Amino acid sequence: MKYALGPILYYWPKQRVEDFYHMVAKSDVDIVYLGETVCSKRRELKIQDWLKIAQMLIGAGKKVCLSTMALLETPSDLAMLKRYCDQQDFMIEANDLSAIQLLSKQDLPFSVGPAVNCYNAQTLDLFLNKGMKRWTMPVELSHDWLRKIVNAPLLENKRTDFEVEVFAYGNMPLAYSARCFTARSENHSKDECKLCCIDYPQGRVVNSQDKNQLFVINGIQTMSGLKYNLINDLKSMHNTVDVVRLSPESEDTLKMLKNFRANETGQNPMPLDKEQECNGYWHKVEGMVQVEV
Protein backbone atom coordinates (compact mmCIF):
# COMPACT_ATOMS: atom_id res chain seq x y z
CA MET A 1 0.00 0.00 0.00
CA LYS A 2 1.26 3.47 -0.92
CA TYR A 3 0.65 6.73 0.89
CA ALA A 4 0.04 10.10 -0.74
CA LEU A 5 -0.22 13.71 0.36
CA GLY A 6 -2.95 15.54 -1.52
CA PRO A 7 -2.53 19.15 -2.64
CA ILE A 8 -2.66 21.83 0.06
CA LEU A 9 -6.28 22.96 -0.08
CA TYR A 10 -5.79 26.10 2.04
CA TYR A 11 -4.09 29.40 1.22
CA TRP A 12 -0.73 29.42 2.97
CA PRO A 13 2.09 31.98 2.65
CA LYS A 14 4.84 30.96 0.24
CA GLN A 15 7.43 30.42 2.96
CA ARG A 16 5.13 28.13 4.90
CA VAL A 17 4.44 26.07 1.79
CA GLU A 18 8.12 25.72 0.99
CA ASP A 19 8.99 24.83 4.60
CA PHE A 20 6.24 22.21 4.62
CA TYR A 21 7.50 20.49 1.49
CA HIS A 22 11.06 20.44 2.77
CA MET A 23 9.68 18.42 5.69
CA VAL A 24 7.72 16.26 3.25
CA ALA A 25 10.97 15.49 1.42
CA LYS A 26 12.31 13.93 4.62
CA SER A 27 9.13 11.94 5.29
CA ASP A 28 8.26 8.43 4.11
CA VAL A 29 5.36 9.49 1.87
CA ASP A 30 5.33 7.89 -1.58
CA ILE A 31 3.32 10.33 -3.73
CA VAL A 32 2.94 14.11 -3.43
CA TYR A 33 0.32 16.22 -5.21
CA LEU A 34 1.27 19.85 -5.82
CA GLY A 35 -0.55 22.94 -7.03
CA GLU A 36 -3.52 25.22 -6.44
CA THR A 37 -6.85 23.43 -6.86
CA VAL A 38 -9.30 25.86 -5.22
CA CYS A 39 -8.88 29.47 -6.39
CA SER A 40 -6.81 31.00 -9.19
CA LYS A 41 -6.44 34.25 -7.21
CA ARG A 42 -4.17 32.45 -4.76
CA ARG A 43 -0.84 33.35 -6.33
CA GLU A 44 1.67 33.08 -3.49
CA LEU A 45 3.38 30.44 -5.63
CA LYS A 46 3.69 30.64 -9.40
CA ILE A 47 3.93 27.63 -11.68
CA GLN A 48 7.73 27.87 -11.69
CA ASP A 49 7.71 27.71 -7.88
CA TRP A 50 5.62 24.52 -7.94
CA LEU A 51 7.94 23.00 -10.54
CA LYS A 52 10.96 23.83 -8.39
CA ILE A 53 9.35 22.13 -5.38
CA ALA A 54 8.47 19.17 -7.61
CA GLN A 55 12.10 18.76 -8.69
CA MET A 56 13.23 18.92 -5.07
CA LEU A 57 10.78 16.17 -4.10
CA ILE A 58 11.80 14.02 -7.06
CA GLY A 59 15.36 14.34 -5.84
CA ALA A 60 14.18 13.05 -2.45
CA GLY A 61 12.70 9.94 -4.07
CA LYS A 62 9.04 10.98 -4.15
CA LYS A 63 6.63 10.60 -7.03
CA VAL A 64 5.07 13.96 -7.90
CA CYS A 65 1.73 14.77 -9.51
CA LEU A 66 0.61 18.31 -10.44
CA SER A 67 -3.01 18.97 -9.50
CA THR A 68 -5.29 21.18 -11.59
CA MET A 69 -8.13 23.48 -10.58
CA ALA A 70 -11.51 21.92 -9.79
CA LEU A 71 -13.52 24.89 -11.09
CA LEU A 72 -12.39 26.89 -14.13
CA GLU A 73 -14.12 30.26 -14.49
CA THR A 74 -12.06 32.51 -16.75
CA PRO A 75 -9.94 32.34 -19.94
CA SER A 76 -6.85 32.84 -17.78
CA ASP A 77 -7.80 29.74 -15.75
CA LEU A 78 -7.94 27.74 -18.96
CA ALA A 79 -4.61 29.17 -20.13
CA MET A 80 -2.99 28.10 -16.85
CA LEU A 81 -4.50 24.63 -17.20
CA LYS A 82 -2.94 24.34 -20.66
CA ARG A 83 0.46 25.32 -19.24
CA TYR A 84 0.22 22.49 -16.72
CA CYS A 85 -0.90 19.99 -19.34
CA ASP A 86 1.76 21.04 -21.88
CA GLN A 87 4.65 20.16 -19.56
CA GLN A 88 5.52 16.47 -19.65
CA ASP A 89 7.92 16.10 -16.72
CA PHE A 90 5.18 15.28 -14.19
CA MET A 91 1.90 13.42 -14.28
CA ILE A 92 -1.20 15.60 -13.95
CA GLU A 93 -4.07 15.06 -11.55
CA ALA A 94 -7.15 16.16 -13.50
CA ASN A 95 -9.79 17.70 -11.27
CA ASP A 96 -12.24 18.52 -14.03
CA LEU A 97 -13.15 17.11 -17.44
CA SER A 98 -11.40 19.83 -19.45
CA ALA A 99 -8.05 18.64 -18.07
CA ILE A 100 -8.90 15.06 -19.03
CA GLN A 101 -9.76 16.22 -22.55
CA LEU A 102 -6.50 18.17 -22.97
CA LEU A 103 -4.35 15.32 -21.65
CA SER A 104 -6.15 12.72 -23.74
CA LYS A 105 -5.59 14.75 -26.91
CA GLN A 106 -1.86 14.73 -26.15
CA ASP A 107 -1.94 11.00 -25.36
CA LEU A 108 -0.52 11.67 -21.89
CA PRO A 109 -1.20 9.48 -18.83
CA PHE A 110 -3.03 11.17 -15.96
CA SER A 111 -4.63 10.74 -12.56
CA VAL A 112 -8.28 11.59 -11.87
CA GLY A 113 -8.89 13.53 -8.65
CA PRO A 114 -11.77 13.26 -6.16
CA ALA A 115 -13.44 16.42 -7.50
CA VAL A 116 -14.42 14.60 -10.70
CA ASN A 117 -17.84 12.92 -10.47
CA CYS A 118 -17.19 9.28 -11.31
CA TYR A 119 -19.91 7.04 -9.92
CA ASN A 120 -20.04 3.98 -12.19
CA ALA A 121 -17.92 1.49 -14.10
CA GLN A 122 -18.86 3.00 -17.46
CA THR A 123 -17.34 6.38 -16.55
CA LEU A 124 -14.26 4.73 -15.10
CA ASP A 125 -13.84 2.70 -18.28
CA LEU A 126 -14.14 5.88 -20.36
CA PHE A 127 -11.35 7.52 -18.35
CA LEU A 128 -9.19 4.41 -18.72
CA ASN A 129 -9.61 4.51 -22.47
CA LYS A 130 -8.48 8.15 -22.43
CA GLY A 131 -5.28 7.36 -20.51
CA MET A 132 -6.09 7.33 -16.77
CA LYS A 133 -3.52 5.55 -14.61
CA ARG A 134 -4.75 6.44 -11.10
CA TRP A 135 -8.22 7.26 -9.79
CA THR A 136 -9.21 8.82 -6.46
CA MET A 137 -12.83 8.03 -5.74
CA PRO A 138 -15.20 10.83 -4.66
CA VAL A 139 -15.06 11.34 -0.90
CA GLU A 140 -18.75 10.67 -0.24
CA LEU A 141 -18.73 7.08 -1.49
CA SER A 142 -18.41 3.89 0.55
CA HIS A 143 -16.16 0.86 0.64
CA ASP A 144 -19.04 -1.34 -0.53
CA TRP A 145 -19.58 0.93 -3.52
CA LEU A 146 -15.86 0.88 -4.33
CA ARG A 147 -15.74 -2.92 -4.30
CA LYS A 148 -18.74 -3.14 -6.61
CA ILE A 149 -17.37 -0.70 -9.17
CA VAL A 150 -13.82 -2.11 -9.40
CA ASN A 151 -15.20 -5.65 -9.60
CA ALA A 152 -17.75 -4.78 -12.30
CA PRO A 153 -17.63 -7.12 -15.34
CA LEU A 154 -16.75 -4.16 -17.58
CA LEU A 155 -13.47 -3.70 -15.68
CA GLU A 156 -12.72 -7.38 -15.14
CA ASN A 157 -9.57 -7.40 -17.25
CA LYS A 158 -8.51 -3.82 -16.54
CA ARG A 159 -8.00 -3.69 -12.78
CA THR A 160 -4.21 -3.89 -13.10
CA ASP A 161 -4.23 -0.97 -15.56
CA PHE A 162 -4.85 1.67 -12.87
CA GLU A 163 -4.41 2.39 -9.18
CA VAL A 164 -7.28 3.10 -6.79
CA GLU A 165 -6.73 5.92 -4.31
CA VAL A 166 -8.92 6.84 -1.33
CA PHE A 167 -9.12 10.15 0.55
CA ALA A 168 -8.51 8.92 4.09
CA TYR A 169 -7.62 11.89 6.30
CA GLY A 170 -8.54 15.57 6.52
CA ASN A 171 -11.51 17.88 6.13
CA MET A 172 -13.32 16.55 3.08
CA PRO A 173 -13.89 18.87 0.10
CA LEU A 174 -17.62 18.52 -0.45
CA ALA A 175 -18.63 21.20 -2.95
CA TYR A 176 -17.39 24.10 -5.07
CA SER A 177 -19.21 27.31 -5.94
CA ALA A 178 -18.65 30.35 -8.12
CA ARG A 179 -19.12 32.42 -4.94
CA CYS A 180 -16.37 32.93 -2.39
CA PHE A 181 -17.77 32.12 1.01
CA THR A 182 -14.72 33.33 2.93
CA ALA A 183 -14.88 36.75 1.28
CA ARG A 184 -18.62 36.98 1.91
CA SER A 185 -18.11 36.12 5.58
CA GLU A 186 -15.96 39.26 5.83
CA ASN A 187 -18.39 41.38 3.79
CA HIS A 188 -16.13 41.49 0.75
CA SER A 189 -17.16 40.81 -2.81
CA LYS A 190 -15.36 38.02 -4.62
CA ASP A 191 -13.63 40.50 -6.95
CA GLU A 192 -12.42 42.54 -3.97
CA CYS A 193 -11.75 39.63 -1.60
CA LYS A 194 -8.42 41.06 -0.35
CA LEU A 195 -7.16 37.46 -0.42
CA CYS A 196 -8.59 37.03 3.06
CA CYS A 197 -8.31 33.22 2.82
CA ILE A 198 -4.68 33.57 3.87
CA ASP A 199 -5.92 34.61 7.33
CA TYR A 200 -7.53 31.16 7.76
CA PRO A 201 -4.79 28.54 7.25
CA GLN A 202 -7.21 25.73 8.14
CA GLY A 203 -10.36 27.32 6.76
CA ARG A 204 -13.14 29.10 8.62
CA VAL A 205 -15.41 26.98 10.83
CA VAL A 206 -19.20 27.20 10.45
CA ASN A 207 -21.24 25.96 13.42
CA SER A 208 -24.85 24.86 13.42
CA GLN A 209 -27.42 26.62 15.64
CA ASP A 210 -26.80 24.03 18.33
CA LYS A 211 -23.06 24.84 18.22
CA ASN A 212 -21.89 21.72 16.39
CA GLN A 213 -19.03 22.13 13.93
CA LEU A 214 -20.88 21.61 10.65
CA PHE A 215 -18.70 22.91 7.81
CA VAL A 216 -15.38 24.56 7.09
CA ILE A 217 -15.46 27.24 4.41
CA ASN A 218 -12.33 27.64 2.33
CA GLY A 219 -12.83 30.24 -0.37
CA ILE A 220 -15.18 28.78 -2.97
CA GLN A 221 -14.88 25.37 -1.33
CA THR A 222 -17.22 23.90 1.27
CA MET A 223 -15.53 21.26 3.42
CA SER A 224 -16.68 18.90 6.14
CA GLY A 225 -16.65 20.35 9.64
CA LEU A 226 -15.20 17.13 11.02
CA LYS A 227 -11.97 15.53 9.90
CA TYR A 228 -12.38 12.32 7.96
CA ASN A 229 -10.11 9.67 9.45
CA LEU A 230 -9.92 6.13 8.11
CA ILE A 231 -6.83 5.10 10.07
CA ASN A 232 -8.70 2.21 11.70
CA ASP A 233 -10.17 1.11 8.37
CA LEU A 234 -6.85 0.43 6.65
CA LYS A 235 -7.07 -3.33 7.16
CA SER A 236 -10.33 -3.41 5.20
CA MET A 237 -8.68 -1.64 2.26
CA HIS A 238 -6.28 -4.44 1.36
CA ASN A 239 -7.00 -5.97 -2.08
CA THR A 240 -9.17 -2.94 -2.96
CA VAL A 241 -7.13 0.24 -2.36
CA ASP A 242 -3.64 0.88 -3.73
CA VAL A 243 -3.02 4.42 -2.45
CA VAL A 244 -4.16 6.11 0.77
CA ARG A 245 -4.40 9.92 0.62
CA LEU A 246 -3.90 12.29 3.52
CA SER A 247 -4.84 15.93 3.00
CA PRO A 248 -2.33 18.44 4.42
CA GLU A 249 -3.88 20.28 7.38
CA SER A 250 -0.69 21.33 9.14
CA GLU A 251 2.73 19.94 9.95
CA ASP A 252 0.93 17.39 12.18
CA THR A 253 -0.27 15.64 9.02
CA LEU A 254 3.20 14.14 8.66
CA LYS A 255 2.92 12.71 12.17
CA MET A 256 -0.45 11.25 11.20
CA LEU A 257 1.22 9.67 8.17
CA LYS A 258 3.48 7.70 10.52
CA ASN A 259 0.43 6.58 12.51
CA PHE A 260 -1.25 5.39 9.32
CA ARG A 261 1.76 3.34 8.32
CA ALA A 262 2.01 1.84 11.79
CA ASN A 263 -1.61 0.67 11.64
CA GLU A 264 -1.65 -0.67 8.09
CA THR A 265 -2.41 -4.20 9.29
CA GLY A 266 -4.59 -3.10 12.19
CA GLN A 267 -1.97 -3.71 14.86
CA ASN A 268 -1.85 -0.14 16.19
CA PRO A 269 -5.39 1.29 16.15
CA MET A 270 -5.92 4.90 17.14
CA PRO A 271 -8.94 6.15 19.11
CA LEU A 272 -10.83 8.77 17.13
CA ASP A 273 -11.88 12.09 18.66
CA LYS A 274 -15.66 11.83 19.03
CA GLU A 275 -16.06 15.60 18.70
CA GLN A 276 -13.69 16.21 15.80
CA GLU A 277 -13.44 13.12 13.58
CA CYS A 278 -15.71 10.93 11.48
CA ASN A 279 -15.64 7.98 9.07
CA GLY A 280 -19.29 7.55 8.13
CA TYR A 281 -19.11 7.67 4.34
CA TRP A 282 -16.71 4.71 4.19
CA HIS A 283 -19.27 2.66 6.11
CA LYS A 284 -22.23 3.70 3.92
CA VAL A 285 -23.86 5.95 6.52
CA GLU A 286 -24.04 9.71 7.06
CA GLY A 287 -20.65 11.30 6.65
CA MET A 288 -20.62 12.97 10.07
CA VAL A 289 -21.10 9.66 11.87
CA GLN A 290 -18.23 7.93 13.62
CA VAL A 291 -18.47 4.15 13.24
CA GLU A 292 -16.51 2.01 15.68
CA VAL A 293 -14.26 -0.49 13.91
Image (cartoon, grey):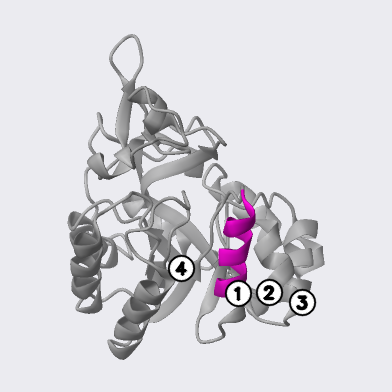
Q: CA distance from mark 3 to mark 4?
A: 27 Å
Magenta highlight range? 74-84
Task: Say the numbered circle drawn on residue 157.
Answer: none
Q: Position of residue 12 (x, y in %)?
A: 27, 53
Which mark sits nearer the N-terminus, 1 or 2? 1
Chain-order first, disc 4 or disc 2: 2
Q: Report the Cα–Cα distance between label 1 and label 2.
A: 6 Å
Residue type at numbered disc 4: Val
Residue carrying label 4 = 243
Q: Amino acid at mark 1?
A: Cys
Q: Secondary structure at mark 2?
A: helix
- Quadrant for the C terminus in the image: top left
Q: Are marks 1 and 2 in contact (CB under 8 Å)?
A: yes
The quadrant holding residue 34 is bottom left
The answer to whether the residue labelled 2 contacts the one labelled 3, judged by CB atoms less than 8 Å apart, is yes
Horizontal side, residue 40 vs residue 61: left or right: right
The residue shown at (73%, 82%) is 107
The amino acid type found where label 3 is placed reads Lys
Quadrant of res 201: top left
Q: Give the structural element (helix, strand or loop) at label 4.
A: strand
Q: Nearer the viewer, mark 4 or mark 1?
A: 1
Image height check: is 86 above or below 196? below
Q: Residue at x 57, y 55 (%)?
A: 137
265, 167: nearer the viewer: 167
The circle on residue 85 is 1
CA gap, disc 4 and disc 2:
22 Å
